[in-house]
Amino acid sequence: MQGTASLLPASKSISNRALIINALAGNGATLHNLSDANDTQLMLRLVDSTEKTIDVEDAGTTMRFLTAYFAVAGKNKILTGTHRMMERPIALLVDALRELGATIEYLGKEGYPPHETFGFSGQRVSTIRIRGDVSSQYISALMMVAPMLPNGLTLELTGRIGSRPYIEMTSAIMQHFGVACTLSANKVIIPHKAYTPAAFTVESDWSAASYWFAFASLARHADIRLPRLYLQSLQGDSAVINIMKSLWVTASLEDGLLHLTKTDVLEDIHWDFTHCPDLAQTIAVVCAARGVKGHFKGLESLRIKETDRIAALQHELRKINADLVEENAENWTLVPSAKLPPFARFETYKDHRMAMAFAPLAAMMDVDIENPNVVRKSYPNFWNDIGSFQVPLVIA
C-alpha cells in the first residue's frame, strides 16, 4: 500500500476550541486550516448564530462548548440535537454553570439536552469542584469561558482525570490567545483576563491519522505519507505512534511528511486509553485482525460517545471471530481472531469512528461498510483518500 493521504483533515478538537476562544476575543483573529469536519462546520455556523434554537446535530463537543459559551455570555438559546444527543448526559456541566451564576433549564429529561440558557446573574463562586473521569469536554468548556468571569475560576478535579491531553490542549490554545492557565495534578487555575486576538493555524488530526496507521499494519506492504502532523503535538492521539510500534508500524518525519512503513515487531498490547479513548476502536480492530491479544484500560468513556462504543465493538468484532471481554470494571481483554472470514459487512451505528476503524480490514479481506456518510463528522474526505490508494472496499 503506497501513497499520500493529501487531504488529511485538520484537527476538529483544536478547531472547535479556537473558534470558541476567538469568539470570546471578539472574532478578531484569523484562523488558518480550520477542519472541514461537520462538527467544526457546525461550530463555525452556530457560535455567532442569531437564531434562538441551536441544533448541534450529533456534535457532542459543540453541544458542551456552546452551552458554556451561551450561558456565561447571558444569551437566551435552546440547545438541541439528534436523538442520540438527547441521551448524552450534560448535568455535570449544567450544574457547574448554575453554581457559577447561569440560569439553565432542561426542556425534557433532567440532566440531558435539550436545555435552554437564559441570563447570567453575575459570578457567585470562584471555585468549582467537578469530576475529572467523565468527560474532559466539560472541563475544557468551563476553562475557556473562565477568563470572562470577574474573579477568574479555579477548577478542582475530583477522581481520576481522563483525557488529560485535551485539558492541556485547551490550556495551550488559551495561552496562544493571551490567557495563561496554571495546571497541577488535580487543579486548574484561570485568571480573569481578556483574550487577545492572535492568528492561529490548526494542525492535522492525529485521530484521522490513526486509520492510516491501521492500514499500514494490516497491508502486506506499506509506504504511506501523511501531511501536516507534528511529533510535538497538542493532541493526545499522537500516542498512536507508540502503540503501533508493537503492531508492525514505524513512523518518521521526512520532508515535512509523516512516513509510515512496516517493521518486524508484533507483540501483545497493554495500553491505558484513559487519555486517548478515540484510538481504542482502531487498535482493537488491528489487534483482532493481526492475532494480537490486547489488554486494555480506560475504556469507560466509550459508553457515552456517539454510540455505546463498547457494545458496538463487541458486536462487530464477533463478525471476524474476535471479541472484547470485560475482565472487571477497569480491565478489558481483546481476544483476537484465529481466522478472518473472507467477507464481513459492518454496521456503523451512526458513529464515524466505527466506520473508519473497520475500514482498514479491507487490506486483508472483503469488507462492506454500511451508512458510510457518517465520516463527514470528522473526516469527510476519508473514502476519497482510500480510493487514491486503490483499496478494494465496498461502501453501501
Image (cartoon, grey):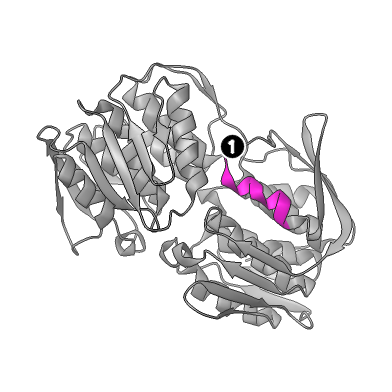
Q: Where residue 374 sits: x, y (%)?
A: 53, 57
Secondary structure mostly seen in magenta is: helix
Q: Where residue 377 sits: x, y (%)?
A: 50, 50
Q: How many marks?
A: 1
Instruction: Pick the residue in front: 312 or 196.
Output: 196
Specify the quadrant of the image occupied by residue 158: bottom left
**Which residue is denoted by mark 1 in the rendering?**
10
Q: Where residue 16 sits: x, y (%)?
A: 44, 37
> In the image, which residues are magenta?
235-243
Q: Is residue 29 visible?
A: yes
Q: Is residue 380 left or right of residue 267?
A: left
**Residue 239 magenta-drawn?**
yes
Q: Residue shown at 69%/48% (left/top)?
A: 384
Q: Residues within 10 Å of mark 1 (few under 14, many from 20)?
A: many
Looking at the rendering, in which quadrant would you find the C terminus?
bottom right
Given the image, on which type of amino acid does mark 1 rest?
Ala
Q: Where residue 26 sits: x, y (%)?
A: 33, 19
Instruction: Pick the residue in front: 292 or 315.
Output: 292
Q: Residue shown at 68%/62% (left/top)?
A: 359
Identify the secondary structure beneath mark 1: loop
In the image, farthest residue toward the left: 121
Q: Is residue 368 left or right of residue 108?
A: right
Q: Is residue 90 left or right of residue 291?
A: left
Q: Residue shown at 78%/35% (left/top)?
A: 257
Specify the quadrant of the image occupied by residue 393: bottom right
**Above-or-below relation of 211 to 326:** above
Q: Residue shown at 58%/46% (left/top)?
A: 236
In the image, farthest residue toward the front: 185
